Image (tube, coloured by chain):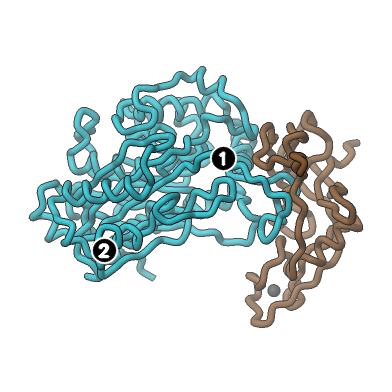
Amino acid sequence: MSGSFTARCEVAVVGYAHSVIQRNAPRTLGAIALETALSAIADAGLTREQIDGFTTGSLLPSAGGHASVDGVSIVTSNWLAEKLGLNPRFAAGFQGFGQLAGGVMLAVNAVATGAADYVVFHRALHNPRGVRYHVNPMTEARGSSQWTAPQGYFGPLAMIGLPYNEYLQRYGASREAMAEVLVEARANGARIPWSYWHNQPITAQDYLDARVIVDPICMLDCDIPVDGVAAFVLTRADRARDLPNKPVYVAGYAQGSVRRPRLPVHWPLDDIMEAGFDVARRLEDSSGLSLQNVDLPQLYDGFSPFIYFWLESLGFCKVGEAHEFVQDGGIRTEGGLPVLSGGGALGNGRMHGVPQMLECYLQLSGRAGERQISSATLGLACHSSPHYGGAVLYSSEPL
Amino acid sequence: MSDLVRQPIPVPDEQSAAFWSAAADHVLALARCTHCGTRVHPAGVVCAQCLHPEPSFEFTPVDGRGTVRSWVVIRDSFLPGFRDEVPFVLVDVELDVQSDLRMIGRLLDGPDAALSQGDRVVTVFEDIAPGVAVPGFALEART
Ligand SMILES: [Zn+2]
């Protein structure tokens, strides 16, 4: 069975826009999304009327059990198209986690098949007001939560804490090693003007002193909830060559999935890794490229342990050795693999996989300014856990 | 209304009623596919093992012993009903009854219990309301 991606490098990213990232924006998310989408369209050298496709993945936040309101706490493709006064041929939303890779896949498929010529892919993220992000005052546990909430097992910190501790215990990793991840993410985020953490790098000691919430997960292992929007424009490679920016080509993509029934939000380490190996193999099959040629692997870091899981499952270091790899300077932008050169979610705020995708786009189109890594040619943008997410390969040249 | 928030009470449904009624009697009864015998927790609407078109499950008692695969210490709970309970330990346990069948529960030995991967635990029950008990774990006595 061939996993070859027949549209390899036939679809390109041709423009983008990113809002400022704020803890609580003074405008509604919809207003920010509208402005950001219009900016992205202009950046791509297009007019609003030329856009005939919209994709996103709008899932989350679910903070405080609050109800999602389109245009306020989430922004769907259809909402955005309608408010832009357009009647697109194609509008779709990715249903699951891994919203970044998922939404890009929908956009790529739409362009490659001719379902749309110019697609706006956007991601809008909201930090609900007046609630602590994950707090849920439930007194009755119904449906899937009946299996975990009565035991006090609830929320994403416990979810990631279990596989992280499984990793720490199995491989004897230390908190000092993870400090390297945080220092790197925040050092790079500090250089990004729109980042929530602009000009706010941290030290290893800051990390080690951070409050532990769900041991072994501390405050700084988690990205901070924010309001922010990013939008990208994708079109066919032949059309892209007539547009003002250097196109960045989509060379392949892959998803991972959950193979066996588990309790809700129960993520055993081996489930994550097994799916990660699938993602790695699928990326190579789809693109015909070796992941060893990726010189800009932007790994997902919404919770810091994901950096270890992605590093190992994609083969950038051996299984069980990511903590040593990181501690030996392996992910430093200077001299190592630029895994977090875009700051990631830890260095920007909870923009899900936007920083990873944006860094691939900016570096490979030569638009990263003073942060430009001149040698980068092949980027990988990962999002979520390997077993709920995916990754997209980007190339600076059509292969 | 009092501002006392209690810990979440499980609300049984068609798929879970037998599990919770056994738990009330401090018996761990896990779903088992009547066609192929595979245990699944939580009980689903289909059997992912045999894909039988007419799924049917029975809840039969199992040995609640198992092995600790991981754990976390909850120091700040996102469920307000657990605020007075912190810190507490949650263990991720592989039950002996079937390979890779995992269950998560509170470790009732307290937050300072020394833990290692591979530690042996037994299922124990906490009565949290009249007629409602929730399974957790306790370290098996080490000899
Ligand atoms: Zn079966």
Residue at the limit of the structure toward the bottom, as seen here: B54
Does A153 sit left or right of B66 as displayed?
A: left
* Residue at 81 percent of width and 33 percent of height: B110
Return the residue nearer the eye: A216 or A347: A347
Q: Chain of mark 1?
A: A
Residue at the limit of the structure toward the front, as seen here: B1
* Residue at 43 percent of width and 38 percent of height: A226
Quadrant (top left/top right/bottom left/bottom right) for the N terminus of chain A: bottom left
* Residue at 21 percent of width and 28 percent of height: A370
Judge: label 2 CB < 8 Å from ligand 1.
Answer: no
- Ligand 1 location (quadrant): bottom right
Quadrant (top left/top right/bottom left/bottom right) for the C terminus of chain A: bottom left
Does A306 sit left or right of A250 as displayed?
A: right
Colour cyan belongs to chain: A
Q: Which residue is mark 2?
A: A53
Location of residue A198 by image quarter: top left
Q: Is residue A230 visible?
A: yes
